[in-house]
Image (cartoon, grey):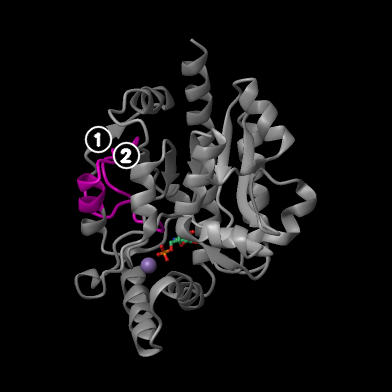
Amino acid sequence: MIVPSRSTEVADALSDGRPVVALESTIFSHLGLPSPANAEALDRCMNVVRAAGAVPAVTAVLDGVARVGLDPSEHERILGPAHKAAERDLPVAVAQRWEFGATTVSASVALAATAGVSVFATGGIGGVHRGAGATGDISADLDALAHHRVVTVCAGAKAFLDLPRTLEYLETVGVPVLGWQHDDFPAFYTRSSGLPVPHRVESAGEVATILANRTRERSGVLVGVPIPESSELDPIELDRVLADALADCDAAGISGAAITPFVLGRIGEATDGRSVPANLSLAENNARVAAEIAAAVSDASAT
Ligand code: PSU
Ligand code: MN
């Protein structure tokens, strides 16, 4: 089995029972955000986790080694072009000594769980793609949420996915979906997808208790945190932008793992970059909530 290498800071925090928050590297690479916003996103997420008293642990594969927690001198390495690494790619990235494998949500929750980190923050998760009935394109993120003992904190998923089917899938595989002080599953740039979450939670303590009382040893919990109101984009404009981005994706014959980065890039262009500050704001906000949850998980394990 893969044994990720933990930074000294992360290993020390875990052995002392202090809170740790895993962060994925795909969003900070060129696959997730354009430069220099990606560097700002990384800084803001790291800082907000530390300000809340937790230790940030970025996941990545560097020079063929799966890592949980990077040294600040290595941050530069995750801000550029990357090879996308989902969970199934991790053993390949090790065997073939990938210089930089950018870990997606599925790879990050797998590495976090193996390293003993219980809480993970990201921007948005992957999900069931529109038209999956024909293409079968369902993100490996969903299966990973079901099979690793990690709380994933996200702003929902982008509306270019099939959100009703994404929620159905999570129900089928037994992942509790919790709305953070909110009744709807969030849709990334907008606070509400129009789809209710099965359960609303008000506090980090509740999430920690839910994690502690799962019925399956290896299974996760998903928390949907709506984007802060002041950063939300206009839902009507966004619908149009998403429809255009998906049409462009079809016309360009893009398929498989390349779909998500392509559509993300198109949304950035079509909103004149206004999607980027929204993305930074929600990523930072998710990292803050994740740090609160990590603190509650540590407190619960100490008692
Ligand atoms: N959604 C975003 N930004 C992202 C991703 C998703 O808004 O950067 C990335 C995440 O790393 C996620 C991955 O795990 O895309 C999902 O890709 P796919 O659909 O190929 O499973
Ligand atoms: Mn896919």
The answer to whether residue 180 is magenta is yes
Q: Amino acid at mark 1?
A: His
Q: Amino acid at mark 2?
A: Gly
On the image, the x and y values in percent for residue 300 come to 46, 17
Residue at 33% across, 59% down: 127
Label 1 CB less than 8 angstroms from ligand 1: no
Confirm whether residue 167 shows in the render. yes
Residue at 51% across, 49% down: 108
**Between 26 and 287, the one nearer to me in the picture:** 26
The answer to whether residue 261 is magenta is no
- 10 Å crowding of disc 1: few (<14), some (14-19), many (20+): some
**Between 56 and 148, the one nearer to me in the picture:** 148
Mark 1 and mark 2 in contact (Cβ < 8 Å)? yes
Circle 1 residue? 199
On the image, the x and y values in percent for residue 14 come to 62, 27
On the image, the x and y values in percent for residue 30 come to 60, 69
Residue furthest to the bottom in view is 251
SS category of the residue bearing label 2: strand
- 10 Å crowding of disc 2: few (<14), some (14-19), many (20+): many
Locate residue 82: give its quadrant: bottom right
Q: Is residue 208 above or below residue 279?
A: above
Range drawn in magenta: 167-196
Q: Is residue 65 left or right of residue 207?
A: right
Residue 179: numbered disc: 2
Whereabouts is ligand 1, in terms of quadrant?
Answer: bottom left
